[in-house]
Amino acid sequence: METDGRRGGRVTLATVADALGVSRATVSNAYNHPERLSAALRDRVLGTARELGYSGPHPLAATLSRGRVNALGLVYDDPMSFAFSDPAAVLFLQGVSEVCEHEDLALVLISGGPAGAVARVALVDAVICYCDVPIDGKLAAIVDRGLPFVVVDGPRLPNAGHVGIDDRRGAASAARHLLDLGHTRLGVLAMPLVDDGWEGTVDQDRQDRARYRASRERLIGYREAVEAAGHRWSAVPVEERLPYGRDAGRREAAALLARRPRPTALLAMSDELALGALAAAADAGLSVPGDLSIVGFDDVPAAADAHPALTTVRQPHREKGRRAAELLLRPHATADEHRLPVELVVRASTGPPPRR
């Protein structure tokens, strides 16, 4: 409790105003809009406030009085650490942060359990949902609150903006690239398909039950390209491992490379999985692309720096973050949908199949 040592009562903004003989608005401006006061007057206000023991307006009270907190929320499916460890998520976060910095907004990262408890109480004005799941958990909590929100990479929802890419088209371009090079024995390194903790070879039933939209769309893209080239999709093995990341890709690739006949090319649903596949090829004594071609998806910085440099599908992660944040700054953006371009970037990790 702040008290006025000279009067023995609680120190408030009004106390400071009375002591200086100025209006309450003047004291408020010293804290919230210093540009509206001369430097000398602001120094007088802050000096008197310190002398009286007044630390400034309570942040929560101030936000409630104006009905805004000047903060965007960013909701993740994954644990909070994912935002700082996954290269694609880091780029996306940079894009969101750039807009927040320009607009002088705070950014609140929201994670938590499936019930969405944190999302229900977080003090934010609008929300970016980086969520690739149906309406449940944290996403359901945002819908229930009635806040403006944008979904990124997830389902298209009524009354919400949407930002994403054509995952199916990008995946199809990756598969066609390998098929055009002459590869007929392909394997797929999958991102998680169903949130059930399962690992192993993915049969058609599990592919059909894929819960995550990006995983499902990329599988469909691969399949459409394979079948359009006259090959059977059922002959293409798909592997899934947990937790998602490079080690999962390494173990997925090891399982595929242990098959006989061995695949001559691997389609990875992300660069992280593809980088793991490069490690698995080295473990098996295989050269890339001489013995094995590998294509990723994302074009994170590590893709170009890999040895060999990784052929991959480029998507604009930072632009995706910027676009999502900018949508929330515009009135009536709830009907907007932005599908950003993807392109195949051919580098040194792909070539014709080995002649043997």
Image (cartoon, rainbow, N blue to C red):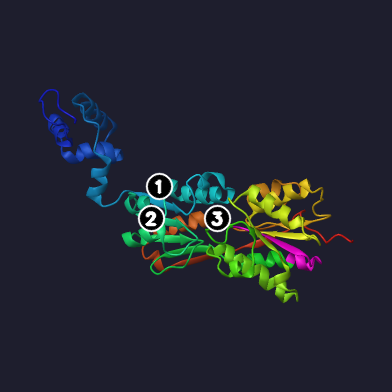
Q: Which residue is mark 2?
A: 115
How far apart are labels 2 and 3 at the CA level? 19 Å
Q: Position of residue 234 (x, y in %)?
A: 70, 71
Point out residue 154 in the picture as x, y percentages from the top left corner: 49, 63
Q: Which residues are magenta?
A: 177-191
Is 260 or 53 nearer to us in this picture?
Answer: 260
The amino acid pointed to by label 2 is Ala
Residue drawn where x is 77% and y is 55% of the image: 258
Circle 3 sits in a helix, a strand or a loop, which is it?
loop
Figure quadrant of residue 293: bottom right
Left of 137 or right of it: where is 84?
right
Comes first in the chain, label 1 or label 2: 1
Residue 166 shows up from this direction: no
For label 2, the crowd category at 10 Å Cα-Cα, with few meaning under 14, some 14 to 19 and many 20 or more, is some
Q: Dot 1: few (<14), some (14–19), or many (≥20) neighbours within 10 Å? A: some
Question: Which residue occupies 71% across, 52% down?
Answer: 277
Q: Earlier in the sequence, mark 1 or mark 3?
A: 1
Indicate which label's residue lies in the foreground, 1 or 2: 2
Q: Is residue 259 visible?
A: yes
Q: Label 1's element? A: strand
Q: CA distance from mark 1 to mark 3?
A: 29 Å
Mark 1 vs mark 3: give the one in front.
3
Relative to 62, residue 144 above or below: below
Q: Are marks 1 and 2 in contact (CB under 8 Å)?
A: no
Quadrant for the C terminus, please: bottom right
Mark identifier at residue 197: 3
> Circle 1 is placed at which residue position?
108
